[in-house]
Amino acid sequence: MLTFKYKNVDSLPLGHTSDKVTPGCIVLEGGAFRGVYTSGVLDRLMQADINMDCTIGVSAGAMNGFNYVSGQIGRSGRINLTYRHDPRYIGYRALRDNHGITGFDFLFNEIPNVLPFDEETFNNSPRRFVVVATNCITGEPVYFEKGKCSDIFKAAQASASVPIASKMVYIDGSPYLDGGCSMKIPVDWAIEQGYEKIVVVRTRERRYRKPPQRLDALYERLYDTYPILRENLEHETEIYNELCDHLDALEKQGRIFVIAPTRPVRILRFEGDMEKLGALYQSGYCDAGGRMHALEEYLK
């Protein structure tokens, strides 16, 4: 029988990282509730005062990024491990109020009443925060940056609006969906920005490669007026697998540092088993801890 929240959620670390800034960029992969792994990783990094100068996130990675930039240890994990079964967050109320699987109004407006978001630190920090969303007309990734876009929260909503399960989000008159439709892991953006130190947090194990999808007919029906977006979705398997090979090559060259699950991640995209999700958080926390010495050497 499923429980409504992770039984050990109250034991998650809690606190605030220092104002120390670590030169470099951290790249956060998405993956819906696989992002709980990333929450564990980031909490361990914050405890070690590893607060990267730039954070770029896609979908669930963007959601985690808010709390990493605000320096709030334990907040991301507590949200997902407490409210997963609240229908205002995930479920029928979210569909009714936000026209998608995730209730962003609840996430951004109501949860902060219980788990306050340090908006002052987030806004005033010199650290960059970038969210990737996909322009549905051009099919291209768009990089929305804190302090340089009209609404970073709306951009994050767009970044995490899953195709098929969510309606498009309009920003400045243009329709957007999940950043993963065009750029699942924006490591090349970090390289092009000139960052010498780049940390990539994966939500799949290194050996994982995406199997063929059979959704072409559904994509054609839903996105018939967005041909470039549809083509991206129809070819996402090969695009993602080529990206994974690219990451492996960059890691072998020592150009990037990767933190990834050490065991296969066997949870559903919208997993409801809270103990599985709790175990995934702990896995991320432990994996980051186990690689801390190597990470510190890389960052020198």
Image (cartoon, rainbow, N blue to C red):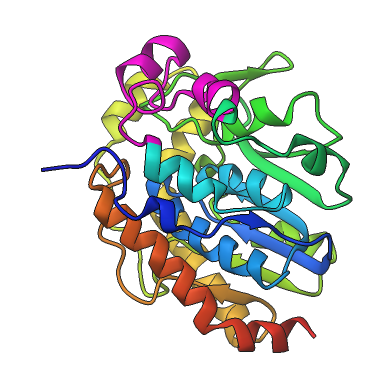
Q: Is residue 260 left or right of residue 91?
A: right
Single out the residue that lies furthest toward the left: 1
Of residues 86 and 94, the one drawn nearer to the viewer in this rendering: 86
On the image, the x and y values in percent for residue 287 come to 46, 76
Q: Position of residue 164 (x, y in %)?
A: 36, 27
Q: Is residue 237 left or right of residue 109?
A: left
Which corner quadrant holds the N terminus?
A: top left
Q: Residue 253: image x %, image y %? A: 65, 86
Q: Quadrant of the C terminus?
A: bottom right
Q: Residue at x 56, y 47 (%)?
A: 75
- The answer to whether one can see residue 135 in this image is no
Whether 296 is drawn above or below 200: the answer is below
The furthest residue to the front: 10
| Residue located 52% across and 63% down the image | 243
Question: Where is 295 relative to 220, above or below?
Answer: below
- Please tell me in which quadrant of the rendered image residue 148 appears: top right
User: Closer to the camera, 196 or 272?
Assistant: 272
| Front one among 49 and 220 | 49
Where is 189 relative to 191, above or below? above
Relative to 220, residue 31 above or below: below
Closer-to-camera residue (43/265): 43
The answer to whether any part of residue 84 appears in the image is: yes
Quadrant in the rendering for residue 140: top right
- Is 85 one of the magenta-colored residues? yes
Residue at 43%, 39% (x, y): give it: 233
- In the image, taking residue 13 as reference, residue 282 lies left or right, namely left
Find out whether residue 25 is within the magenta segment: no
Magenta region: which residues? Answer: 83-111
The residue drawn where x is 35% and y is 36% is 84
How far across and down, in percent of the image, does residue 290 sit?
50, 83
